[in-house]
Amino acid sequence: MFKSKILRKFLMAIAILVIGYTVAIVFIALPQIDKTINKLEEQNAKEVLDKIMLLTDNVGKNLEDFKKESLQKHKEELKNITDVVHSMMENTYEEAKDNPKELEKRKKILLDRISKVRYGGNNYIFVVDYNATMLSHPYIKRGSDMNHVFDIKGEPIVPRLIEVARRNGEGFTHYWWKKNNGDDKPYEKLTYSRDCKKLKMVVGTGVYIDDIDREIEKRKKELFDELRSIMKKTRIGKTGYIYIFDEHRMIIHPNSNIDGMNFKKLPNPGKGTFIYDDLVKAAKSSGILRYKWDKPTDKGHYVYDKISWIRYVPSMKLYVVSSAYVSELEAAATTLHNRIILLGILILLLSLVFSAYYLHRLFSPVCALTETVNKIAKGNYSIRAKVTTDDEIATLANNFNLMVDRLEEQINNLDQKVKAKTAALRELAVTDPLTKLYNRRYFSEISTRIFELSERERSELSVMMLDIDKFKSINDTYGHQVGDQVIITLAKIINGIKRESDIVCRYGGEEFIILLPKTSKAGALDLAQRIRVAIEEHEIILENKDETVKFTVSLGVAELEYTKDNEIEDVIRRADNAMYIAKREGRNRTYEL
């Protein structure tokens, strides 16, 4: 074997390739790989940091949205509660306005009831007259003059909310007010007041802002708990992590001993500074801090290089930090490049030894066959594989050609069958089998499209509904076969009278509907009248009987009204109502709405 000059040259070439590959890997590729992997590790840490920063920013936006929604919810609640009481006050006036004594009696009963109303824990409703005299309040005496009751800013409370209510009919007012008789501390309050002109009173209720703030704080805690759960599962390198702090304390940290603590005075032994100050300073400059720190497995020895990436989230006034040990970031690169060297050498040696002889001989016919397969995959079923070798690949090619012959024939047959079936199924899906008219499903589709087209063009569109009068009696008297014949006859009469553009559908049972594009109500009424008369004058001669059957229909007509119709169902509903009015008024007639 080794006497062959070609083989020796080939083996020499392989040896040169292996040596050259090894040299290139060791001195060129590996340093670049290490550098790239370290860069990717750092990039990964930054991306994780950016994602957590985005989540933190979203928490801020979520809280802001929640605050707005919570305030709006409370405003709506205040308004709804006040509106209910306002309605009660107006009803009291209307029921006794002609009897002053009875009115005063009822006012007193109502005011007593209002003063006892509680909702939402400690919230209540109050009523004052236009002179700022208290008429109903849970702990302020009735008849108290509220003109000289001021909030902590020295502004009168009740006269101001009376002014707002009387000027605008209703409105919101902010002021400071104590919560109850046992607590003299004032709290900011949002009050909604409404003017009851008939009784010359103002009714109102309010909510304390700190109650809303507690809801917001609860939501904030929930969001931060979710963020904490995500961050606990996030690792940078092997033991690296992410934490969040503000200007006062650590907000989220995977170490429960540090989470929540004030670490402003936590020293940075490697620099003789405070780690908090270093992180804040780095956030305002490069966003990167390199320093010496200890490890969980080697407490108190601040000799390990560590790197932190810091971002500031202005919306939350928080700092987000991604921190990892440099050695852990480099460990991945070291492990990877060692594996690359080993695997690279093994793969290269094996591939060079076995590929030189077999690749050309094996892949030439395979490539030819692959090229043929790709062309067939693109739809060219006329091409065939041409492989002349005397081996399994040739057998595969021949069998493949036979398979393609059968596949081409089957595809042609199947294509014809699919087209025929599709056409039949389409007709079956939209056609009523008895009358050969369109069915309700098709009408729902086409009526919506025609409605939208009419809206765009601002063209006329009418709908006609018709129903066979006393159809059940026909079935009971003559049987369902005659009933079917009546329905078929009605369909033929309509088809003989309608325009080509009109769409007739069997809507259900003995009920039919006609869609009349570009047709006014007057035109629809004219067509309806012609259909009604034609049906009234028609006779059905029963087979094998000396007997005829006559029947009538009731019709309803409606035209599209752009000012109030939002969909075709609105027009159909009016036409249907009109048809039932025609039936109630005696049948065999047309009614329009």
Image (cartoon, grey):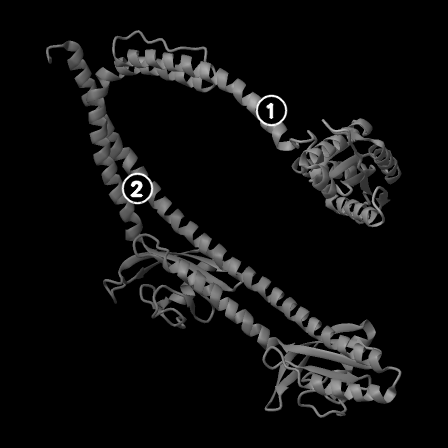
Residue 68 is situated, as x and y percent measured from the top left of the image, at 62, 65
Total residue callouts: 2
Secondary structure at numbered mark 1: helix
Note whether 11 is above or below 156 in the view shown.
Answer: above
> Measured from the top left, where is residue 568 in percent x and y?
74, 43
- Is residue 199 visible in this depiction of the protein? no
Number of other residues with Cα within 10 Å of mark 2, as a class: few under 14, some 14 to 19, many 20 or more: some
Query: Viewed as shown, does residue 485 lie left or right of 532?
Result: left
In the rendered image, the vertical position of residue 6 relative to residue 173, given as above or below = above
Residue 254 visible in the current orientation: yes
Figure quadrant of residue 280: bottom left
How would you rate the neighbour count of disc 1 (Cα within 10 Å): few for under 14, some for 14-19, many for 20 or more? few
- Numbered circle sitting on residue 116: none
Left or right, residue 448 beside residue 255: right
The kind of residue tagged 2 is: Asp
Helix or strand or loop: what does disc 2 sit on?
A: helix
Mark identifier at residue 423: 1
Residue at left offset 61%, top offset 67%: 70
